[in-house]
Amino acid sequence: MSDPAEAERLLGDGQERRKVRRDLCAVCFMAALIVGAVIGLAAVWASLANVETLPKRNVILMISDGFGPTSQTFARTYNQHVNKLKYNYVSPLDEILVGSSRTRSSSSLVTDSAAGATAFACALKSYNGAIGVNSKKVPCGTVLESAKYLGLTTGLVVTSRITHATPASFSAHVVNRDMEADIAAQQIGDNPLGRQVDLMFGGGRCYFLPNHTEGSCRIDQRDLVKESNKQGYKHFATRKEFDDLEPGKDKLPLLGLFTLDHMSYEIDRDPAQEPSLKEMSEKALKFLDSATAKSDKGFFLMIEGSRIDMAAHSNDPATHVHDILAYHETIELVKKYVDEHPDTVMISVSDHETGGISLARQVSSDYPEYLWLPEILTRVKNSSFILSQGLVQYWNVDRENFIKNSIINYGLGIDNVKDYEINWLKEERDQLEYEYYLANMTSIRAQIGWTTHGHTAVDVNLYAYGKDIEYLRGNHENIDIGDYIVDYLNLDLDTITSKLNNSNFHQASDSTHFHADEHHPHTHI
Ligand SMILES: *[C@@H]1O[C@H](CO)[C@@H](O)[C@H](O)[C@H]1NC(C)=O
Ligand SMILES: *[C@@H]1O[C@H](CO)[C@@H](O)[C@H](O)[C@H]1NC(C)=O
Ligand SMILES: *[C@@H]1O[C@H](CO)[C@@H](O)[C@H](O)[C@H]1NC(C)=O
Ligand SMILES: *[C@@H]1O[C@H](CO)[C@@H](O)[C@H](O)[C@H]1NC(C)=O
């Protein structure tokens, strides 16, 4: 990187770039004044008044983790097949496509979810693994924190561990995404700014339980459930408690952690145990709406379809598509909310693509014949992840029957299994090897291709819904989305950054409790 201006944009703390946008806005404002002068003094007065008192506004940022343009085509065509929809069916996302987002981080052409989310949260490029810190590892103020500082109500709704990279980047500041025990503590208010998040729904309870208690994955004795109560949180973990929550009788802050690890994939989810992404989002909107009803300040809510990405890492097409369709349903819900609340903007974007999925294959070379067989995927009942757990556990003498019947015929819905496939699965192997193998058995039959178990560099689709979304049209850097939220809510990230910096917080967050956890191995997804 020889050009210093280029280096500043990619590696700097974001101030340089934001100044550029403010200058641009000053130009717009001057232009508006001149036009105003032509129309009359009254109009000038109105436009000035407008600038000074920003109306009550809400932002709902939806993140589809690991979801590229091909996955959108995949989900649409799958849905068309299953529900016999017309060829020109338009999905809830297709209706609101506005542009695309470029995803590179400061350290790599291919971002991870930590740098990807930090780009949205802090409006600056940082390195892969960075959680709410800039490329020099200094904590950066996030849109969530700045919103809270200005009196807005805040929420995070995810299907991963709440301590996972995406939600963490809005609500914590650590130099490495694996420091999830520290992230959990910061999220409930153990940070220089105090409690920032008014509502958290997701998984990851294991990081809130003290070491040596059942289900814990902490290496220290901190009981963050107890500490969260001291910070005012009502903590709950069951479907029943979730269902019983009502804005009339329960108050923010809320901490709902439904599983120890990630919440289930949609294809595996037991609705009696875990709410869906849509249900969690609906409840969150109810609470945020009610909490801000009598206020002149709105809310900031981040909703993540977290596990779309993980299924793509496993190259498991049926699991991938079910999590995408659950995300589509959530988009529909949020669009309805925006319709009823025109002071709200919804943005939907991915941090990056995952899996390098390709849809359909040319199956003959003389006359090109193309196939993509969604029917194969409609028969799949379980994620390859859950089925691979069965394969590592089941060693009874009838293992072969178990593989044929429970795993392949019932679980994958495959009735033309090959002998070499059964023989491969009979051998003792790592769970991840089984998982990839099972996922490939459905991919190959459905004619879906994958190029990687990691992320790719492709631009992702950018969707938006509501008034004042013109700026988002076209091709953007991911950090522009952070800038847009800053402008829309009139936030000031630099104030938060200097509050974080003054407390010497960055030194503290560098080394404490680093714990690469063996119970929840991270593949940096
Ligand atoms: C408890 O802490 C010890 C180290 O202090 C660690 O080896 C162990 O894995 C921890 N337990 C869990 C469940 O994480
Ligand atoms: C697979 O899915 C079926 C149908 O939903 C369910 O009854 C079964 O328990 C699942 N299997 C596993 C191993 O989770
Ligand atoms: C997927 O399965 C096909 C058919 O068994 C095999 O040829 C191919 O190598 C497998 N691909 C991967 C990535 O395992
Ligand atoms: C943060 O504080 C350090 C000194 O502790 C200073 O060197 C650095 O420039 C500050 N960074 C920001 C972004 O304010």
Image (cartoon, rainbow, N blue to C red):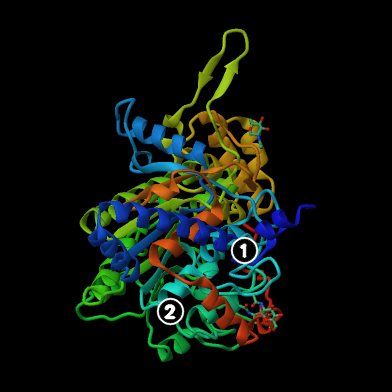
Q: Earlier in the sequence, mark 1 or mark 2?
A: 1
The outermost residue toward the bottom is 230
Is residue 379 visible to us here?
no
Circle 1 packing at 10 Å, graded few (<14), some (14-19), many (20+), is: few
| Side (left or right) of 136 relative to 329 | right
Where is residue 316, by image quadrant? top right
Looking at the rendered structure, the kind of residue marked 2 is: Tyr
Q: Position of residue 256 (x, y in %)?
A: 39, 73
Q: From the image, which quarter does the C terminus lie in?
A: bottom right
Q: Which mark is residue 180?
A: none
Q: Which residue is mark 2?
A: 149
Query: Do tag 1 and tag 2 residues touch (Cβ < 8 Å)?
Result: no
Q: Which mark is residue 16?
A: 1
Disc 1, SS: helix
Give 170 or 55, whichever is nearer the viewer: 55
Is residue 368 visible to us here?
yes
Give 8 or 406, whichever is nearer the viewer: 8
Looking at the rendered structure, the kind of residue marked 1 is: Glu
Using the image, determine if residue 403 lies above or below residue 206: above
Circle 2 packing at 10 Å, graded few (<14), some (14-19), many (20+), is: some
Using the image, determine if residue 138 lies above or below residue 61: below
Instruction: Give the image quadrant in which the ligand numbered 3 is located.
Output: top right
Q: Position of residue 342 (x, y in %)?
A: 25, 57
Give 71 or 35, whichever is nearer the viewer: 35
Q: Residue at x 36, y 57 (%)?
A: 33
Give 109 or 48, whichever is nearer the viewer: 48
